[in-house]
Image (cartoon, rainbow, N blue to C red):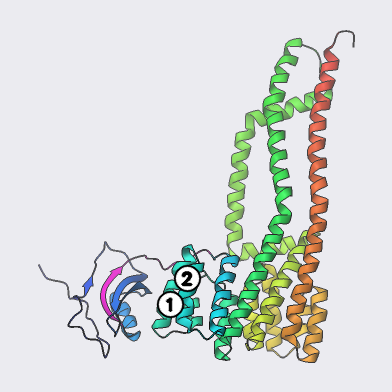
Amino acid sequence: MSTPNPVPTITPPGVDTTALPPFRLSVLPPVRPTAYRYRAARADGAMLTGVIPAADAMEATALLVERGLHPVELTPGETEARRVRPASRRDLAIVFQSLASLVAAGVPLERAVTASEELARGDLRQALGRIRLDLREGRSLGQALERTEGLVPAVAVGMVRAGERGSQLGRALQEVAGHLEREAELVGRVRQALAYPLILTVAGSVSVAVITTVVVPRFAEVLGELGRELPPATRALLATSAFLSNYGLLLLVGLLVLGMTATVWVSEPKGRERWHHLLLLVPLIGTIRHQLATARLARALGGMLATGMPLLPALDGAAEAAGDAAVRTRLQQARERIARGEPLTQSLARERVLTPSALQLLAVGESSGQVATMATRAADLTVQEADRSLRTLVGLLEPGLVVVFGAVVAFVAAALLQAVYSVRPGL
């Protein structure tokens, strides 16, 4: 039986392999790997582990050698190379604020990352460990953040890379921390405003379901034994209750299937864009979504321009921060106009990217050469507008829900009382 040819290894200059363990390639069942988990030695003898994307062992070995590493062990197969869930904006803000403070105080970047690891948790803490190793291997902070595969938002990565190019890393880190902190505050404000209506909706729906599927059927048994003709409202109530009792589970399953189908559709780029476009057309809800997207875009644009990033790349990074697929598409169309030479504010206005008040401030910034400053002010102003609109929506939603559920309960009570009075002797 022939022995398969061993995978050749390449030793980078300066690495003493005499004290290293022999190279091993773990062979798994047939599977086309997309990445390799590796153990490799650095020139100073330190052992590193991680994951490297590669189609085969030769490519993985070559990539490790390019990094100045001597591969000791490679394991093919599907690995940890995946898109992870984005980290909490609040946690990211704390980490970047720590990095900004330490870098401003003159602490070396690698030591600043090490100190900031204690403030993180979960995937973010592990990512900081990998970032520290990347910095030790000679990568920039922007390159290391980009390798977190979605854990750190693209807008934050772009701002850091722009700051590194302009030798303004400390300022860039501070801008990122401020951006993430305001994002976390905005998200928390929206959740807090919608918490009570959501609780009211759930409690009201459960109460109505219990009344129609438990209370009313028992009452119907009593009325059926009397053999009297019931009022129309009572008959309608009993028919609704019977339908929900017989087909409620099937209806629930149907709603779950519909919800899962809608979730899959929205997860696709085209479906998500179409859904977000429809939401923008809904009165008040569309206004709030547009205001929130404007605040995110303007703040991201202002932050990246402040770190020295050119306008077109800054627009690309701001598109990632929109949080709304329809608004992001509008911004991309406006970017094409700007690339052809059209003015910034005019292009944004034609594509309806930003709210009118934000456009006015941005026009002032464009005419005075202070686009970054006015974009940040536009974001602050739009957040205030969104907060007022959100309070208006909640102010209408809460009494509306009370009226709807109150009307349902009143109808049930009235229908049952009519039935009671209709079967009493002499009435």
How far apart in space, not on screen, are marks 1 and 2 (Cα)?
A: 10 Å
With respect to residue 68, does 117 lie above or below?
above
Q: Residue at x 83, y 21 (%)?
A: 417
The answer to whether residue 353 shows anywhere in this view is: no
For the residue marked with disc 1, what is the amino acid? Arg
Residue 61 % position (x, y): 29, 79
User: Marks 2 and 1: in contact by CB < 8 Å?
Assistant: yes
Picture coordinates of residue 240, whole percent (x, y): 73, 30
Is 4 situated left or right of 214 in this image? left
Q: Looking at the rendering, in which quadrant would you find the C terminus?
A: top right
Give the residue furthest to the front.
Answer: 105
The quadrant where residue 193 appears: bottom right
Of 103 and 397, nearer the camera is: 103
For residue 294, which quarter of the picture?
A: bottom right
Identified at 44% across, 68% down, the residue is 126
Residue at 57 percent of width and 70 percent of height: 94
Q: Nearer the viewer, residue 131 or 280?
A: 131
Answer left or right for 54 relative to 252.
left
Q: Which residues are magenta?
A: 69-85
Kind of residue sitting beneath label 2: Glu
Residue identified by numbered label 2: 117
Q: Secondary structure at mark 1?
A: helix
Relative to 314, 43 lies left or right: left
Q: Residues within 10 Å of mark 1 (few under 14, many from 20)?
A: many
Residue nearer the viewer, 187 or 335 = 187
Residue drawn at x 80%, y 84% as measured from the top left? 363
Which residue position holds label 1? Answer: 132
